[in-house]
Amino acid sequence: MTSYPSFADAYTAGLSDVLADGSYVPSVRDPLSKASDFGRNDRPYRELLGYQTRIENPASALAASPDLPINLSYCFGLLAWSLAGRNDVETPAFYRRGAYEYSDDEHTLSGAFGHRLVTHNGNQLEEVIGRIERDPAHRRAFALVLEPEDNFRQSREYPCAVGVHLFLRDGRLTWLTVMRAQQALTVMPYDAFLFMGMQQYAASQLNVPSGPYIHQAGTFHFYENEAPLAQKIVDAPPAAAALPSFPHDAEGGRRVAAELIDYERRLREAAQAGDVAAVDEIAGRPAETDFADVARACLATHAYRKLGDTMSLVTSSAADSAVADLISAI
């Protein structure tokens, strides 16, 4: 397993590996799967089996590429939604319209990672953190996303994530995400951002810094018609962009999560209500924590775009130049 300093480096290398060594696989046929475009199209793909990568700095969680711009508001919205343990489809659809096509009932997303880790059948993340607190050498700190019932349900959702495994090693929290399937080009930037954010939160609850982030996929792939775009990204590698780290203490981590969840909810609801004054008020109040303040700037800028205002740009002094550029591109 190769180790990379940032997600951008790991992402570029992963695409290069699939281009160089990926095997051709004919299209999935299941009409309940996005891999067949829900039965509408053939989607042959290239894949590597049993692929694994390691990122040393989970705060460096963004890859900035003009060839495939990252939807940063979706990143923060997804992290807030997941830390809150929710599974409504309305929230992710506010940032990505296609979210509804994964819902069986147009109201919920039954396979939502955060919901399954945090609120469904108890708070697994809290439990495995507690196991490590009580026994730092523990090897049973594995929280499950995929469940046996998923094999017996007829659903548009069959979670891509199997679960997450936490290790306290050398005074830092190492986080291993196990994916059954990882779309390597257009989806991995969001999955990696989500889980590295959750890693930072979990590390704060243990009063330690984050250590390496490891991402393991049973099938690591992109679709055959995406190969030219993957090659463009490999030929012009994306720049690494880093977010402020979570505080390395439990109270600070909980404050970041609470502020992030609160900003996301209030800005989304204000935009959905067409309440410009409320967006102005929320956008104008900096967060107490640096990570949440960058999220405020991003989510508020997105709220203005939803209101039809393409000129207003909310800034944060905690955003580095690369992240500021991503916010301005919303």
Image (spheres, helix red, strand yellow):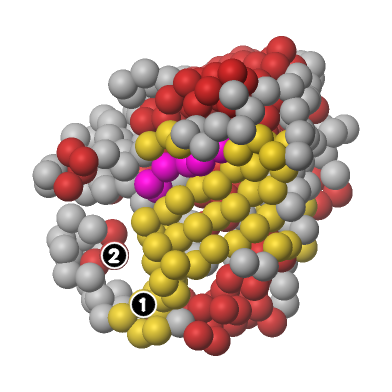
Q: Label 1, on which residue?
A: 45
* Residue visible at 65% across and 78% down in the picture: 234
Residue 277 lies in the magenta stretch = no
* Residue visible at 63% across and 28% down in the picture: 136
Q: Amino acid at mark 2?
A: Ala
Crowding near the residue tagged with mark 2, few <14, some 14–19, many ≥20 C-alpha atoms within 10 Å: many
302 to the left or right of 235: left
Q: Secondary structure at mark 2?
A: helix
Residue 164 lies in the magenta stretch = yes
Q: Quadrant of residue 63?
A: bottom right
Q: Nearer the viewer, residue 92 or 301?
A: 92
* Residue visible at 31% across and 21% down in the picture: 121
Q: Main secondary structure of the magenta part?
A: strand
Question: Which quarter of the image is occupied by the N terminus?
Answer: bottom right
Q: Secondary structure at mark 1?
A: strand
Q: CA distance from mark 2 to mark 1?
A: 9 Å
107 to the left or right of 118: left
Q: Amino acid at mark 1?
A: Tyr
Q: Quadrant of residue 129?
A: top right
Question: Given contact means CB atoms under 8 Å apart, are the residues at marks 2 and 1 in contact?
Answer: yes
Q: Is residue 203 visible?
A: yes
Crowding near the residue tagged with mark 1, few <14, some 14–19, many ≥20 C-alpha atoms within 10 Å: many
Q: In the image, is residue 316 above or below residue 231? A: above
Q: Nearer the viewer, residue 36 or 296?
A: 36
Residue interval drawn in magenta: 161-166
Q: Is residue 325 visible?
A: no
Q: In the image, is residue 273 above or below residue 24? A: above
